[in-house]
């Protein structure tokens, strides 16, 4: 790989800030140890594949097309098995996958060279023109998330593309989505096929069966293009068949694991985890790995003129009425949020939890009623929008009850995740909304819902156009401004205006079969079943 100035800045400097946790207050939740390989046993390290692994998911991708990348959360587990990207994001460095490396021409023009022998499962050679087509398929579909710095991409020669940026690449996560989340595929295959149900793969696995609402089956791609000596360790195919079973009710994940229907799930309710640990009724052949995740469920008010939630006092009344301990218990998975973020990230600061008027750390009914008395609210019914999956529905039901306790009436609008994505952009559809946030850093996670350039509407996800908030975000995402002081100022500004209320952070509770010798995760979170090692004896 060509090591350039930007590569050093975004890799070494950023890793020092985020991974070493140089911003004070960052801690990890108590966790147990991931499985360590027993070298005395025969494993897939000998080159033989494990036959089949079944993994439980609570939601369905519904559409496997590459332009659906920003949709349901299940896509983060499934689609990167059969779609490759130019780079992986790993320890905040850009690790070449389809790319051989990149070169800065100048601040606004960077070139990426890809391997000249990349083929998909139909034998199509992937060229620079295919890379360009892949990018504009995503852009034209309106699914180019976090593309603030992207202006254009064009083919320079058969295997080199040139990116033009809107401004220099000097911020945290500037290329997370453009380089590491944008699937690359053959234009010919896309135009002649049906990628919604049967995409043509460039990854280590290919789709062999997909039934919406039921299961997705992948088989190892024996014609994977990369040479053995250059093949990335996270892009292996150590198991022949990967089956994703869509099981919407978390209680059914317990049954599916106990009967051997599935061998891995992150959706077992916390009260059932002990059943799979030492001494538990299902401990034989199973184990549990628990660690802090990056996911954050955020509640926000609609700040447009179409909603009563544009009143800051009503937002504060709502947020102070909420009890995150109760909401987390209702969800059945995850931990109660105490600030707008998660200790998964090195730039999270536990001091935020002690901030004055931090409504995320305390339920204060009296204060909620005081703020409510300062509004014109007169018993109107507010619409709470969220996903129809079991976890979000349970959270919304608890929120409804907590708000009724202070005299605020709420109706729940639970929709399919794809419809939520659409209705979220319609200010007439909701007053309150639960959304899932993620990113490569804490400020990257904030970007998703605070950035008013994110959706091309001049408003952020909460229908806010606040230049001060935007200035804070842009400062905090720059390498120079990404400091404890600036991050704290932004957090305080959000509290002052009651723009957002974090509800729960993700606790990754993985129950797995003891046939797993190791667990491998993309970006430390999303299981790469093919890159795991398995016992064969």
Image (spheres, rainbow, N blue to C red):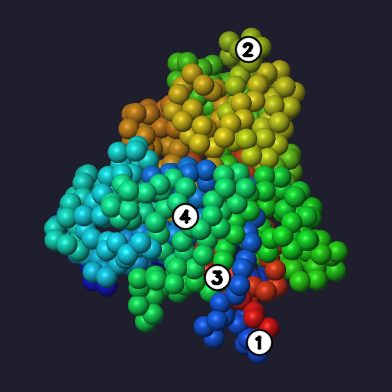
Report the residue marked by disc 3: 240
> Which residue is more in the foreground, 26 or 332?
332
Picture coordinates of residue 491, whole percent (x, y): 48, 41
**Alpha carbon of mark 1 to alpha carbon of mark 4: how far?**
32 Å
**Alpha carbon of mark 1 to alpha carbon of mark 3: how far?**
20 Å
Picture quadrant where residue 249 is located: top right
Q: Tell me the mark number nearer the camera, choosing from 4 and 3.
A: 3
Q: Is residue 482 above or below residue 121?
A: above
Tag 4, which secondary structure? helix
Circle nearer the N terminus (1, 3): 1
Q: Tell me the mark number nearer the camera, choosing from 1 and 3.
A: 3
Q: Marks 2 and 3: in contact by CB < 8 Å?
A: no
Q: Tell me the mark number nearer the camera, choosing from 4 and 2.
A: 4
Tell me: 462 left or right of 110. right
Q: Dot 4, how many residues are within 10 Å of its Cα: few (below 14), some (14-19), or many (20+)?
A: many
> Is residue 341 visible to us here?
no
Report the residue marked by disc 4: 79
Q: Dot 1, how many residues are within 10 Å of its Cα: few (below 14), some (14-19), or many (20+)?
A: few
Q: Residue 334: which disc?
A: none
> Which residue is more in the foreground, 513 or 467?
513
Tag 3, which secondary structure? strand
Tag 2, which secondary structure? loop
Tell me: 239 left or right of 403. left
**Alpha carbon of mark 3 to alpha carbon of mark 2: how far?**
56 Å
Residue name at image x 38 percent, y 63 percent: 121
Residue name at image x 71 percent, y 18 percent: 407
């Amino acid at each position: 790989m060509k090591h350039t100035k930007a590569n050093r800045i975004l890799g070494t400097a950023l890793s020092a800030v985020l991974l070493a946790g140089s911003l004070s207050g960052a801690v990890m939740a108590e966790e147990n140890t991931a499985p360590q390989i027993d070298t005395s046993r025969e494993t897939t390290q000998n080159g033989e594949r494990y036959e089949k692994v079944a993994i439980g998911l609570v939601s369905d991708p519904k559409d496997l097309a590459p332009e659906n990348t920003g949709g349901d959360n299940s896509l983060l587990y499934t689609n990167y098995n059969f779609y490759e990207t130019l780079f992986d994001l790993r320890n905040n460095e850009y690790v070449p996958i389809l790319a051989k490396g990149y070169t800065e021409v100048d601040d606004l023009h960077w070139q990426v060279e890809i391997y000249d022998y990349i083929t998909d499962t139909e034998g199509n050679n992937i060229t620079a023109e295919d890379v360009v087509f892949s990018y504009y398929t995503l852009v034209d579909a309106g699914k180019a998330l976090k593309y603030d710095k992207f202006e254009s991409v064009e083919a320079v020669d058969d295997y080199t593309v040139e990116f033009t940026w809107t401004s220099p690449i000097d911020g945290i996560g500037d290329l997370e989505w453009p380089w590491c989340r944008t699937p690359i595929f053959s234009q010919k295959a896309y135009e002649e096929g049906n990628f919604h149900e049967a995409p043509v793969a460039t990854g280590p696995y290919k789709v062999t069966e997909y039934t919406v609402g039921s299961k997705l089956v992948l088989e190892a791609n024996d014609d994977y293009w990369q040479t053995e000596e250059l093949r990335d360790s996270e892009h292996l195919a150590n198991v022949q068949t990967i089956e994703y079973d869509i099981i919407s009710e978390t209680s059914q994940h317990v049954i599916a694991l106990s009967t051997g229907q599935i061998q891995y799930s992150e959706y077992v309710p916390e009260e059932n985890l002990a059943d799979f640990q030492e001494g538990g009724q299902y401990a034989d052949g199973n184990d549990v790995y628990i660690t802090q995740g990056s996911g954050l469920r955020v509640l926000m008010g609609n700040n447009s003129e179409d909603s009563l939630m544009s009143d800051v006092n009503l937002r504060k009344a709502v947020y102070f009425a909420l009890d995150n301990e109760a909401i987390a218990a209702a969800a059945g998975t995850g931990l109660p949020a105490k600030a707008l973020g998660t200790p998964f990230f090195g730039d999270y600061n536990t001091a935020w939890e002690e901030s004055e008027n931090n409504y995320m750390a305390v339920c204060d009914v009296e204060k909620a009623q005081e703020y409510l008395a300062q509004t014109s609210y007169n018993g109107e019914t507010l619409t709470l929008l969220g996903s129809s999956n079991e976890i979000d529905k349970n959270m919304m039901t608890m929120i409804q009850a907590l708000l009724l306790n202070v005299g605020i009436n709420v109706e729940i609008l639970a929709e399919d995740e794809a419809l939520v994505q659409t209705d979220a952009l319609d200010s007439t559809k909701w007053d309150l909304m639960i959304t899932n946030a993620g990113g490569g850093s804490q400020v990257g996670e904030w970007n998703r819902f605070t950035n008013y350039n994110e959706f091309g509407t001049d408003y952020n996800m909460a229908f806010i156009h606040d230049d001060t908030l935007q200035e804070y975000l842009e400062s905090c995402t720059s390498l120079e401004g990404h400091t404890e002081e600036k991050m704290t100022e932004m957090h305080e500004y959000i509290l002052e205006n009651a723009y957002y209320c974090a509800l729960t952070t993700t606790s990754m509770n993985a129950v797995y079969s003891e046939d797993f010798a190791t667990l491998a995760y993309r970006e430390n979170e999303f299981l790469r079943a093919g890159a795991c090692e398995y016992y064969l004896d």
